[in-house]
Image (cartoon, rainbow, N blue to C red):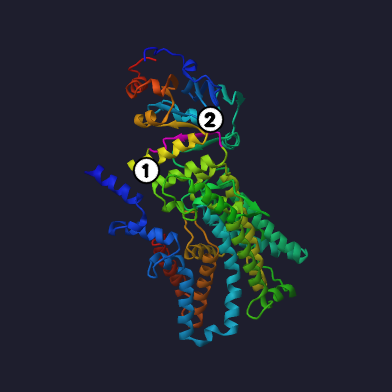
Amino acid sequence: MSADASARSTTGEDAAPATGTAKDAGTAKDAGAARGRRPLFDVALWADWAALIGLVVLVVVFTALDPGFLSGGNVEGMLAASAALLVLAVAQTFVVATAGIDLSIASVMTLGIVVLGQLHQAGQPLAVAMGGAVVAGLLAGVVNGLLVAKAKITDFVVTLGMLSAASGLALILSDGQPVTITEKFFFTVSLDGPVPLVSWIVVVAIVIAAIAHVVLFHTRFGTHVLATGGNPEAASATGISTARVKIAVYAIAGLLAGVAAIIVVTRLGSTPPAANTTYLLNSVAAVVLGGVSLFGGRASILGPIFGALLLTVLLNGLTTLGVSQYYQPLSVGVVVVAAAFLMRFQK
Amino acid sequence: MTGLHAAPASSAPATTPLLEARDVSLSFGSVRALRDVHVTVAPGEITALVGDNGAGKSTLVRCFSGVHTPDSGEILLGGQPVRFSTPEAARDAGIETVHQNLALVEDLTVWQNLFLNREHTRFGMLDRRRMRREAADMVSQLAVNVPEVTSRVRRLSGGQRQAVAICRAAGFSSQLVIMDEPTAALGVQETARVEELILRLRDEGHAVLLISHNFDQVMRLSQQVWVMRAGRCVAGRRTAATTGQEIVGLITGAIAA
């Protein structure tokens, strides 16, 4: 009886999707999606674009409640506020695409912030201080990568350790004191831009996202990142060094955390040494909202970008509506879990 | 079929073997996985490797595909001794392996899998159009119902996946395609289609080394059978000169080789 059933299910799979009976509706839908023709009310379609749809809905709702929400000043502020998170979300995407996770990303950013501050205080030129932040992030990322790929320690544990180590190092280096930086250059890049509403730091974030998209989808390395996340055994069997790929993605994450550090400092004009866990949670949340599978192998750059924008809009909107700050983490939590629930329908 | 005590070498065809293992031994710690194994694979033939679970079939083919390196003995390719330290080295020498777990990445498309780690690039960027076109050519030659090269492997049936894996192995001017139980997880129809594909590979001039537990399949497809038991190659037969019953006897040890 059971043998009969399994034989039938095999032929069912084998049959051309066009002949799909009610039982084969799933197969037929798969096939339709594969050809790019999806029914409008396919949940999977909505799941793929959850972040963008959520973003549009939030903008519409907040604008309806407060017409000032879409004022030039507020839009410019929101874009500038999202720049660092955009960069971190792109960084996190590379790691998550290999089925890893970088819990240290915000702490490494803090380390970069402190290194920038200390170099500046030591009288180094701004370029050196900014370069120092990026190098510090890159080094932390390489250490993460080596521990994950070569020492074969679980990514979760390695980056949790780095979370603590990098924030500790930031406190040691700075002695817990922020450095105030009043450089004209920083005001310029965070307040001015090539076009209205878009400051230079937003341009930097967009350029980084564009490069990341090209790297992920138009280079051999990007394909190998997705293969490493999708099926590490298969990747190794074709001769891909999954260890090298993993070291590379953590290094990229560290490097971009250093860039995010510079962006944060340009906006604040100071280098707070305190760890900022909100950035960590939001970077992971943006990736999840963007439809990137935490199991690896599937990724998008546009998705996490919309995810990061959605989170920024959510927090900004609640603030402009006068909702207490205390409700903000709660709202982020609800949105992220709701998005993760939608992902279950993603094909 | 009376001369049961035929030495392995003498029962092989007279032409220079494409691949030959001479007295290959390999131990994992105290476990002697392979002991003085001697097998040959003739060009343009389907050679079957049979044996019970744990007899050493997979270990032997992993020596051929560069996953393991023998402790002693020689592997000759086209009469020349070779030593593969990595799977890539074996692939470069023209030995492709279709692994039991297929080694496909489900979330990548058919063309991405076909060109995995052999991607064509232009100016450092992937040449997606060229790879899609060549993949479509490769896939269109399959007997199995043809999947779209732009669909993700996740959406393919078991037979289509196997076909893609075989297609990848055959597609890159390989001399020898090793297949580890290619139809183990397939239904009746899909098995038939994959068998057609294996015969096509042979007709196109590839040598095939086939591990199979399905004796009917071995009798249908192969020209030469090697039987392994407890790490040794205990017998070699021309398929035309043996029976499924004899093979079973050799595998279990009921018939002394």
Mark 1 vs mark 2: give the one in front: 1
Mark 2 neighbour class, 10 Å CA radius: few under 14, some 14 to 19, many 20 or more? many
Please name the residue that numbered disc 1 is placed on: B190
Q: Residue furthest front?
A: B203
Residue A209, percent across and down? Answer: 60, 65
Name the quadrant of the C terminus of chain B. top left
- Is residue A164 positioned above or below B35 on the image? below
**Which of the 4 image quarters holds residue A169?**
bottom right
Determine whether, in the image, residue A116 is placed left or right of residue A78: right
Return the residue nearer the eye: B71 or B252: B252
In primary-sequence order, the first of circles 1 and 2 is: 2
Please name the residue that numbered disc 2 is placed on: B64
Q: Residue furthest left?
A: A1
- The mark total stands at 2
Q: Are marks 1 and 2 in contact (CB under 8 Å)?
A: no
Q: Is residue B182 magenta?
A: yes
Q: Is residue A19 magenta?
A: no
- What residue sits 63% from the left and 72% below the top? A202
| Amino acid tagged 1 | Glu
| Amino acid tagged 2 | Phe
Over which residues does the magenta segment extend? B174-183
Q: Is residue A84 visible?
A: yes
- What residue sits 47% from the left and 53% below the top? B107
Q: Residue furthest bottom?
A: A67
Chain of the residue displaying label 1: B
Q: Is residue A155 visible?
A: no
Helix, strand, or loop for circle 1? helix
